[in-house]
Image: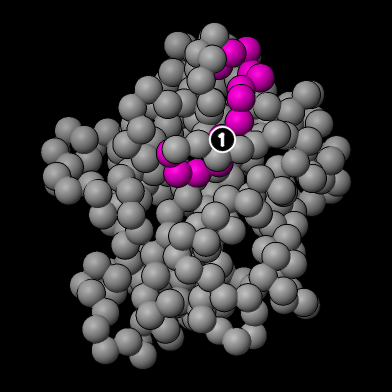
Amino acid sequence: MPTYTLGRRQAAPLTEHEAARLKAPLRIILPGQDDQPSSTPPLSHAAPLPVAVVHSPRGGQTTYHGPGQAVLWPVLDLKSPHHKQFTVRCYSRLLEDTTISVLRSLFGLAAFITEDPGVWVSPTSPGLLALNDPAKIAALGVHLRRHVTALGTAINIAMPSADVLSEEINPWARIVACGLEGKTVTSVAAEVDGGLQSLDSRLGNRIREEAVATFWGGELARRIGVEGVDAAAHDDVVALVTDILSRSDDATAEEVEYVKRMQRLF
């Protein structure tokens, strides 16, 4: 389900107009499906999807999660004796380095970090070349409670880029992503030669997001010194987060509501 999450730096409540804008139905059209100019209405065959707007315990401001994106939320005890231990700063760098390695290994993309959070690339897509600035290809947002991590990173696999102007098609057109004025967003499909066809040939007959998530999980495990990584279903992840929260005696109302939202979404 397409979802906007509001981080802790989103101090001011949304106005009625802002809330309505974010919650307007979204038509999911993958890059290459719509041959019309970006300023024209989307294809009629793309069914509109409802959009959720939720508050998140992560840092930062507003970002988007939805179809075409690999959302990667490791749940780790940073002080566990069963793997390498990390400070919060080092853990954030671990997520960035893992993502950079995956983008290079799977797609040959030279991703990097900047003074802003997340992972970036120098855009090659025609609509972004004129901007000259880096474009964000993966977002980062971390939450910790008693050294246990939540949230993580999200890689844009096949999503509209900033040159698609229609808010009915492009979820990024509705927000200033992560509160970074003047910055643009891109995706793997927009940056690899050959677009979606090249993307699919590299990943084989696998669902794009799941294939990337599996590779990313293996790379993270290698970096923290863990072997034997198994894939977990969505409901298993929600059950784990719910259990962690239920055993906490000082959970905030925000955290409780966030887990309830996860339960409803999955």
Please say whether residue 216 is one of the residues in the magenta stretch. Answer: no
User: Left of 21 or right of it: where is 51?
Assistant: right
Instruction: State the residue in front, 126 or 77.
Output: 77
**Magenta run includes residue 123:** yes
Q: Quarter of the image holding residue 186? A: top right
Query: Residue 167, can we see it?
Result: no
Q: Nearer the viewer, residue 96 or 87?
A: 87
**Is residue 124 toward the left or the right of residue 227 in the image?**
left
The image quadrant of residue 192 is: top right
- Which residue is found at the position 65% from the left and 36% from the top? 111
User: Residue 38 location, x and y as percent?
Assistant: 50, 14
Coordinates of residue 176 in the picture (x, y in percent): 34, 31
In the displayed structure, 134 sits above or below 229; it is above
Q: Which residues are magenta?
A: 116-129
Q: Going 53% across and 26% down the picture, which residue do you hit?
A: 134
**Disc 1, SS:** strand
Question: At x 79% / y 45%, what residue is drawn?
Answer: 105
Give amino acid for label 1.
Trp
- Residue where numbered disc 1 is placed: 120
Percent x, y of residue 184: 47, 26
